[in-house]
Image (tube, rainbow, N blue to C red):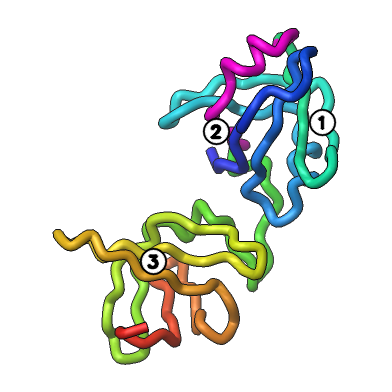
Amino acid sequence: MVVMGRVTAPFGVKGWVKVYALTAHPGNLRGYPAWWLGHDGDWREMRVASARIHGNTLVAQIEGVADREAAAALRGFEIAVPRERLPAATDDEFYWADLIGLRVVNAEQHEFGRVARILQTGANDVLVVAAGNRDERETLIPFIASAIRQVDLAAGVISVDWGRDY
């Protein structure tokens, strides 16, 4: 499963939910007739009755979710899609799920740690790299062409043009 978003709140009184999409284009989630909702890998398939963009937010009606109380019970659930249902990424595109856990090193072979998560900032995505040692230090590296030299999924490494002291 690839996590594509999460339910943030009920929307209205008829069982609709607000969705925080983790996709470049939130409306893309409307293309999947079923979503898998859950926590920590415990998924259950749910059919999407309807979905639309409302302002700058994706809202959806899930089959079997008939009122605000039922919608509120889904708050915080992750929304996932099976990997095999996703379109193939192009040479210069990556699914966030594929970047999580990759080692991050610079040209001097300084290892910053592993990608723990990715932030959406509006301007660009940002890798949050956890050092993995006792000081729990995190390094934030923008996922832009001038900072990312190469992503090698097979080797499990992201090479960056990033100084140790940034």
Instruction: Kindly state the secondary structure of the residue where label 3 is placed.
Output: loop
Residue for point 58% across, 21% down = 74
Question: How far is disc 2 from disc 3 in space, using C-alphas?
Answer: 25 Å
Residue for point 45% across, 73% down = 141
Residue 134 % position (x, y)? 14, 59
Q: Earlier in the sequence, mark 1 or mark 2?
A: 1
Tell me which amino acid carries mark 3: Gly
The answer to which of 146 and 75 lies nearer the viewer is 75
The answer to which of 143 and 136 lies nearer the viewer is 136
Left or right, 31 with respect to 162, comes to right
Q: Is residue 37 magenta?
A: no
Residue 34 % position (x, y)? 71, 27
Q: Earlier in the sequence, mark 2 or mark 3?
A: 2
Question: How far is disc 1 from disc 2 in space, using C-alphas?
Answer: 16 Å
Q: Residues within 10 Å of mark 2 (few under 14, many from 20)?
A: many
Q: Which residues are magenta?
A: 65-81
Residue for point 52% across, 58% down = 119
Foreground tag (2 vs 3): 2
- Residue 45 is drawn in which quadrant? top right
User: Vertically, is 30 above or below 127?
Assistant: above
Instruction: Kindly state the secondary structure of the residue where label 1 is placed.
Output: strand
The residue under label 2 is 78
Residue for point 43% across, 81% down = 160
- Farthest bottom residue? 108
The residue under label 3 is 156
Q: Residues within 10 Å of mark 3 (few under 14, many from 20)?
A: some
Say which mark, if any, is on residue 127: none
The residue under label 1 is 51
Q: Is residue 79 magenta?
A: yes
